[in-house]
Amino acid sequence: MAPMNKQIQLLTSVTLILLLTACSHYGIEKKALALDTAMNRYATAVRWGEWNTVYRMHLPLNEAKIPPEAIKTIRVTAYQELGAAQMDTPETATRVAIIRYINEETQAEASLRQEQRWRYDSENLFWGLDSPPPFFD
């Protein structure tokens, strides 16, 4: 093979590798942005007591999830994320949140620690929680 052909072949190979790397990186960035959006949506739903939204964000998506009746007496007073989300793999992430709340029937204030395990549902292109919804005593 002529030296010019080898140079063209090498240049083509390097270009292809760079393109594949860039596409892979773009896919991970896109998933990370989608995760951030989902986590913010979830935090807002918890903070404002939008329980149907909270329960719908838990996987699997095709299961009907109805919040328990007792949750209607819960008023969240604070939602605090402990640190940034940790992307364990391109398909999974974890985050810990502290939820402070008042039970309106007893006027008792309490808090809970929610360990969130997020999983990317590649079939539905959706980040959802693979851990249970918050449990309020």
Image (spheres, grey):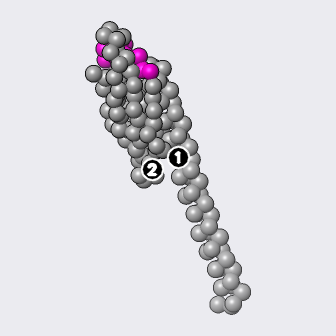
Q: Do the residues labelled 2 and 1 touch (CB within 8 Å)?
A: yes
Image-based side of 87 in relation to 15, left or right: left
Image-based side of 112 in relation to 123, left or right: left
Image-based side of 19 in relation to 46, left or right: right
Q: Which residue is drawn at 65% across and 70% down?
A: 15
Q: Is mark 2 on a helix, strand or loop?
A: strand
C-alpha gap between disc 2 and disc 1: 8 Å
Q: What element carries label 1?
A: helix
Compare marks 2 and 1 and give the one earlier in the sequence.
1
- Decide: is 19 above or below 122: below
> Looking at the picture, how far across and down is residue 53, in whole percent?
45, 24
Q: Is residue 47 visible?
A: yes
Amino acid found under the numbered disc labelled 2: Met
Q: Which residue is drawn at 56% across and 43% down?
A: 33
Q: Residue at x 45, y 29 (%)?
A: 79
Question: Would you call the spot at circle 2 few (<14 residues within 10 Å), some (14-19), or many (20 or more)?
Answer: some
Amino acid found under the numbered disc labelled 1: Ala
Direction bottom: furthest residue: 2
Q: Residue at x 44, y 48 (%)?
A: 86
Q: What stretch is highlighted in magenta?
A: 68-77
- Decide: is 132 above or below 118: above
**Quadrant housing residue 78:** top left
Residue pointed to by mark 2: 87
Question: Would you call the spot at circle 1 few (<14 residues within 10 Å), some (14-19), or many (20 or more)?
Answer: some
- On residue 32, which mark appears? 1
- Decide: is 1 above or below 53: below
> Looking at the picture, how far across and down is residue 4, in whole percent?
72, 86
State the residue in front, 10 or 131: 131
Q: Check if residue 75 falls in the magenta segment.
A: yes
